Image: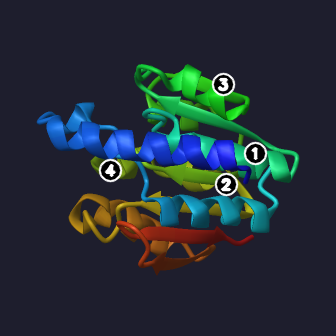
Amino acid sequence: MDEPTQALLAELYADGVHHDAAEPDRLLRRRNLEPDTAALLAQLVRIAGARRVVEIGTSNGYSTIWLALAARDVGGRVVSVDTQEWPGVRQNLRRAGVSVELRLLEAGAYLADRPSGSVDLLFLDAERVEYASWWPHPLRVLRAGGVLAVDNVLSHPTEVADFLALVSADPRCRSATVPVGKGLSVTWRGH
């Protein structure tokens, strides 16, 4: 990663931390990934050769940029889905020099409308208590060999418990929790 991109990501992360510390409404916080988690997620995109990446939860585009840079390395693209367009997100993506398809709609509806096996890597970083209601679509949209990544599994275990139970009950799934940042669950979807 070049120095200007590193500087932009550091700026966005620091701005997010500062913003969130002053914002009492949890839903208005940026809640960006920690840099180590973002770097790991980007490497997962590269290792899996994930050309069709879907992110649920755009915020200010911090994790979106990490994903888009990695997807570009493997000839892929990113679709980022959120219920609202956060101030500055398009500018942040332009500053990073990445092309991302932003979709403004409810994530469950977006996933339900995706064809089976149409996603190589799905990253969930939105309203955690909603994930279980999207079932079975988060797994259905993944191709065999695809990756499902879920953030905040150690910081908010009760909020993701129902969803992770659904994932672990599926015999096609092999999951591990990586103790990086707030905890990243990584699932490989078998055949």
Q: Pointer 4: what residue?
A: 128
Q: Is residue 149 visible?
A: yes
Q: Do the numbered discs 1 and 2 sit on residues whose CB atoms are within 8 Å?
A: yes
Label 4 CA crowd tier, 10 Å (few <14, some 14–19, many 20+) = many
- Residue in view at x 55 percent, y 52 percent: 123
Identity of the amino acid at label 1?
Arg
Residue 143: horizontal and vertical position, in percent?
A: 74, 56
Residue 94 disc label: 3
Residue 71: horizontal and vertical position, in percent?
A: 76, 48
Circle 4 SS class:
helix
Label 2 CA crowd tier, 10 Å (few <14, some 14–19, many 20+) = many
Instruction: Pick out the residue farthest to the right.
Output: 75
Circle 3 SS class:
helix
Marks 2 and 3, Cα distance to the nearest angstrom? 23 Å
Residue 138: horizontal and vertical position, in percent?
A: 54, 51
Q: Is residue 66 above or below residue 111?
A: below
Quick one: 53 or 131, which is closer to the camera?
53
Marks 4 and 2, Cα distance to the nearest angstrom? 18 Å
Marks 1 and 2, Cα distance to the nearest angstrom? 7 Å
Q: Pointer 2: what residue?
A: 121
Identity of the amino acid at label 4?
Arg
Q: Is residue 117 visible?
A: no
Chain-order first, disc 2 or disc 3 = 3
Residue 40 disc label: none
Q: Do the numbered discs 2 and 3 sit on residues whose CB atoms are within 8 Å?
A: no
Label 3 CA crowd tier, 10 Å (few <14, some 14–19, many 20+) = few
- Residue in view at x 32 percent, y 50 percent: 128
- Residue in view at x 65 percent, y 44 percent: 5
Q: In the image, 155: left or right of 88?
A: left
Identity of the amino acid at label 3?
Arg
Q: Pointer 1: what residue?
A: 52
